Image: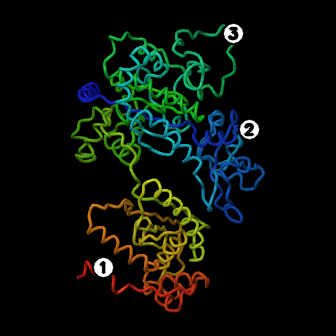
Amino acid sequence: SPFAAAMSSGAAGAARVIAHLDLDAFYVQVERTLDPSLHGCPVAVVQYNPFEQGGVKSMSAQDVRARVLDRGAKDFENHSLIAVSYEARACNVKRQMRAGEAARLAPECVFVQVPTRRSKADLTSYRDAGAKVAQVLACGGVIERASIDEAYLDLTLSANAALEEVGFEEVVARARRSHVAGASEAPAFVSKANLRAGSADGVVIAPATDGGVGGGGDAQEASVATVSEPSEPAAAPDPMAKFRPRLPDEASVAWWDREEHEWREEEKLLAAGAYICEGLRKRCVDELGYTLSAGIAPNKMLAKLTSGMNKPNSQTVLCPDHTENLLRDLPIDRIRGLGAKLGRELAEALDVKTIGELAVTPIRKLEHVVGEEKAQWVRKVSLGLDDDPVKAREMPKSIGTGKTFRGALALKSLEAVKYRLTELAAELNDRVEADEVEWDRTAKLLTLGLSSPDERGTSNGYCSRSCALRAGAAEKAQDALALVSKWASGRSNWSITGLSISASNFVSNEKDCGDVVEMFKNAAERATTTATPAVSPIKADQIDKSVLAELPEEIQREIRASLFPKANAAAGGTGGGPSFKKAKNNPITNYFTA
């Protein structure tokens, strides 16, 4: 088959062991660590209400009880769910549902609003929790954070070391708790609906009341063969059954039970990867209180695909021989990159619905539909091939924050814009300062982004403006407001539905003392910089005076102070300071101009 040929060609290269680890109902888990009384009951984390009377109030992450919604509140019904516990999912509560509908489905559900600060969601507690998990996972190998609650690990080196140091028998003894995707001929894919709900398709064999991560006992002794028909009348269905960890099925147990001589080297490596993942997941439970699900496979695409198959708190291994069983009946939209326009285009043009059908489609037909380059990529992923490496964390190229103002919240005056920019600039300033501490670098460029129905120069109503970045939250807010003022000049009855500001163009703070000429240059720049007060990057003739006149007097003074520094300096400035002038006889600058 094309799958077998692809897998054999892939195995000819260096075998890899890649894991994808995903925290289970992550926001709910974080809230439960903050308030243990939430354990065991249905919980939903909801978005804040942007239309809250009097503005969005700041609510601390630590004060969970204050963030529990009052069902009697008139705006309760409209809160949108962004995370749902498995107890709530058992009552058919789903993400993106409104709180009112969820409350009718799960009367006992507790609705916790996300923390808020500066008129927007404050995700700090979730980011910090995700970072702590990432620190534990990084002990296993090279880590690539995919989002706030998921990561890829390259376990290849660690897996080889485990086989050498621990031994094959010990590896299998722990790793056998893992499910084996595709070991059974039964359809092994997870539907998108159930993936969103957090559970896999298929019959539940037995609840994992012992064994595995987060429990005692030895799961390796369990076998599907021991499950028999009940002699007594069947009990009422357990609504939580498919939301509990399951024991591996019979085909998985048989795969683990093979003699060592029946194992190929790449299979042993995957087993060692499962051994390592089991240990990392247990550490996350023991040290942090968080459960994760994992997929272990030869590449990132397949690892991501398998990690969600047996949620929650379980892990799944996919070996090359089973890839065809997994992908054959898999809907096209379950492969990342084929879930949107490209996937629909292929399905309609080629009359295919599954990855298996796509895999046997002649390459010429693929090229006719999507072009030669995309056709090659489609062919590779349809065969389960992916050579994308796990990339260690890199310094971010930009740091930004933003907020949308849809409908009645649209901003229609510079005073309203200033209020919002002040909040955004304060957040950006905090993050820029933290970045400087972590990476020892300084951002030099401030970029303002705005969305507006009045911006007809672009297809989506978005435009951006940039200027030099100054230190300080107030300075960032002032310069961003000046950029908006310039944009608003000449427009009437404008409105803004989205604002963002970001910092970029980072320069390392490390000083190279090896070059004497560079040292003098840097000294000259510092002498000039320190002798000149910070000014706005916007020129006076770029501001519409009629727009400026609309602003409150205090804002006008701030803008004029940055636009006309010389006049202010000559007048003594707001603080009566001296007028700054460049020194005429500077030995450093003269050295270069002589």
Q: Amino acid at mark 1?
A: Thr
Quadrant (top left/top right/bottom left/bottom right) for the C terminus: bottom left
* Residue under pointer 3: 232
Residue 197 vs 515, above or below: the answer is: above
> What crowding class fits label 1: few (fewer than 14 Cα within 10 Å), some (14-19), or many (20 or more)?
some
The residue at the point 50 percent across, 45 percent down is 148
Residue type indicated by callout 3: Glu
* Residue that badge 2 annotates: 108
Q: Which residue is outermost to the right?
A: 72
Q: Position of residue 444 (x, y in %)?
A: 40, 67
**Gap in angstroms between the C-alphas marked 1 and 2:** 74 Å
Coordinates of residue 563 in the picture (x, y in percent): 47, 84
Secondary structure at numbered mark 2: loop
**Relative to the observer, which residue lies in front, 331 or 34?**
34
Between 585 and 526, which is closer to the camera in this rendering? Answer: 585
Mark 2: few, some, or many residues within 10 Å (few <14, many ≥20)?
few
Q: Residue furthest front?
A: 587
Q: Secondary structure at mark 3?
A: loop
Residue 180 lies, with reference to residue 544, above or below; the image says above
Left or right placement of residue 589 versus residue 115 in this view? left
Q: Which residue is mark 1?
A: 589
Q: CA distance from mark 2 to mark 3?
A: 31 Å
Q: Indicate the position of residue 451 as horizontal and vertical percent values.
A: 48, 67
The label nearer to you, 1 versus 2, is 1
Q: Nearer the viewer, residue 455 or 208?
A: 208
Q: Residue at x 44, y 16 (%)?
A: 170
